[in-house]
Amino acid sequence: MAEPSYIRIPAATLEAFIAAIFEGAGCDAAESRRISTHLLGANLAGHDSHGVVRVPRYVEWHQAGFVLKGQTAEVVTDGGCFALLDGRFGFGQTVAPQAVELGIARALQHGIAVVGLRNAGHIGRVGDYAEAAIRAGLISVHFVNVAGSVLVAPFGGTERRFSTAPFSVGVPLPGRPLVLDFATSLVAEGKVLVASNGGKALPADALIEPDGRLSGDPHTLYGEYGQTGPRNPANGAGAIRAFGEHKGSGLAFMCEMLAGALTGGGTSGPVEARGRIANGMLSFYVSPRHFGTEAEFHATGRAYVDWVLASNPASPGEPVLAPGDREAATRAERLANGVPLTPDTWASILAVARQLGVPAPG
């Protein structure tokens, strides 16, 4: 299959344009900029599935009342080093940072913190929150689910039972931070969205049809759709597969238990009684300084990273990478050369802007 064509948009231009779209949708300037910066950050990191391709869907959800502007997360339980917050269905880029900021502050105070967040709008790239903890010198672990969203078939099944259930870990090593960030599905739903808009093709076994046949066709998930415009997973008969067979399926199960059931926000299904989907997140923050091993942790961790990366590469010219290396390289390249978007993705964003009366970049 031929490589997709791309339009390159300068990062600053794209960030300002997306912020203007959300202002046009009714958000205030600060929230609009937060959403735009977060979505752009996902593109800069190479996680296009969680980037500006989401703009039409976010606007659609906001207009339908599924996600609300200007929300402040409500503290439901506060036990000092642990807390539970309710996002009140606010934009994830508003309420998730509030939960993360609380977790960071409490971990810096107590040495450890456990913070649950429920009923948040789509929180986007979870690695962004691990990076925030790294900047504070903290280790963090994040389990995420999507209440009311069934997209992924469990190992051995064909019917949808899990959300894409992301998982992320951040490790603050001096000069060499590590960020592990992935969906427990074989591909994120956003990657199916990108493929449906003319972007990178899916692996041939990323999806599964009701009869068990494997598929790389986005129609398996979305059903029929136009060249531009919204995609609705409810219209498709198939499912995304879990990564790593039983291992990814098992991790997705635990994300639903910890981020969904424990926080009280609900699991991916059954969905009959829910009118909207929402993210849940359970985060753990640990301070190496309070733990008493910070110097040893930094020295041993750096030495181990260097030793792992010194492994002889399986393919000449393709060195072994640590978690986060590819994102850092992609960020530098895209800041220099612009963010690549497929023509269909760009057309969909422009269509939303026209609908809201927001002029396109000159």
Image (cartoon, helix red, strand yellow):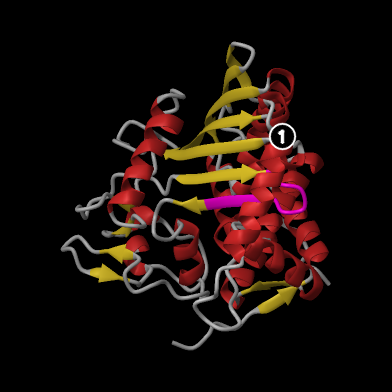
Q: Residue at x 38, y 55 (%)?
A: 233
Q: Residue at x 59, y 11 (%)?
A: 79
Determine the main secondary structure of the stretch shown in magenta: loop
The percent position of residue 183, horizontal first and vertical second, equals 46, 52
Q: Is residue 82 left or right of residue 191?
A: right
Of helix, strand and loop, which one carries label 1?
Answer: helix
Which range is magenta? 172-181
Residue 54, picture quadrant: bottom right
Q: Name the kind of residue labelled 1 in the image.
A: Glu
Residue 192, picture quadrant: bottom left
Label 1: how many Cα within 10 Å (few below 14, some 14–19, many 20+): some
Q: Is residue 145 left or right of residue 90?
A: left
Let me know if residue 175 is in the magenta part.
yes
Given residues 293 and 20, the one toward you in this image is 293
Let me know if residue 80 is in the magenta part.
no
The percent position of residue 195, horizontal first and vertical second, equals 47, 71
Q: Is residue 213 left or right of residue 329?
A: left
Picture layout, residue 40 above or below residue 160? below
Q: Residue at x 58, y 28 (%)?
A: 87
Given residues 117 and 29, the one toward you in this image is 117
The residue beneath circle 1 is: 294
- The residue most toward the left is 211
Picture layout, residue 253 above or below residue 177? above
Q: Residue at x 45, y 71 (%)?
A: 226
The percent position of residue 35, horizontal first and vertical second, equals 70, 47
Given residues 185 and 28, the one toward you in this image is 185
Residue 209 visible in the shown view: yes
- The residue most toward the bottom is 2
